[in-house]
Image (tube, rainbow, N blue to C red):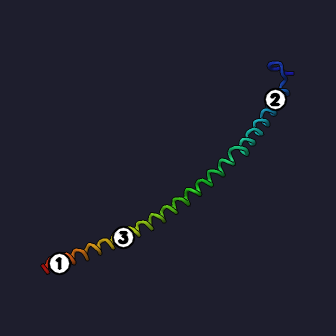
Amino acid sequence: MHVFLGFTIGEWGNFITIATVCAGLFTWIIRVALVNPLQNSIKELTSQIRDLKMDSKEEHEHFTESLNNHEQRLNDHQTRITVIEKEIEEKK
């Protein structure tokens, strides 16, 4: 019978099997307890950021449209004021 560091080859095989099973169990527990919840949280956060981006884009478009409307009205008022000023100057 072969002996290495006081253990037989069969005992070494048992140790390696036990260590492999324990490492696999530890990996599975870590995945279930930490990795999967983190992946779910990241997916949810990504979805919320995407929704926020879309909302922000819609809001920006609304404000741009409103700004353009205000600018047009301001230009119309400026034109009316200029016309009125010319009429006043002509009456003098």
Cα gap from disc 3 to disc 1, whole angstroms: 27 Å
86 vs 78, left or right, is left
Q: Earlier in the sequence, mark 2 or mark 1?
A: 2
- Residue drawn at (80%, 20%), measured in percent from left and top? 4
Foreground disc of the pair 2, 1:
1
Question: Is 43 left or right of 17, judged from the image as shown?
Answer: left
Q: Residues within 10 Å of mark 3 (few under 14, many from 20)?
A: few
Q: Nearer the viewer, residue 85 or 24?
A: 85
Which amino acid type is shown beneath numbered disc 1? Ile
The quarter of the picture where residue 69 lies is bottom left
Q: Residue at x 73, y 46 (%)?
A: 32
Residue 91, percent across and down? 14, 81
Identify which residue is drawn at 79% across, 31% down: 16
Label 2 or label 3, whichever comes before in sequence order = 2
Q: How many marks?
A: 3
Categorize mark 1 by other alpha carbons within 10 Å: few (<14), some (14-19), many (20+). few
Residue position marked by numbered label 1 in the rendering:
88
* Secondary structure found at label 2: helix
The mark lying in front, picked from 3 and 1, is 1
Q: Amino acid at mark 3?
A: His
Q: Which residue is mark 2?
A: 15
CB atoms at circles 3 and 1 under 8 Å apart? no
Circle 1 sits in a helix, a strand or a loop, which is it? helix
Q: Which mark is residue 22?
A: none
Nearer the observer: mark 2 or 3; the answer is 3
Q: Which mark is residue 70?
A: 3
Q: Position of residue 21 (x, y in %)?
A: 79, 37
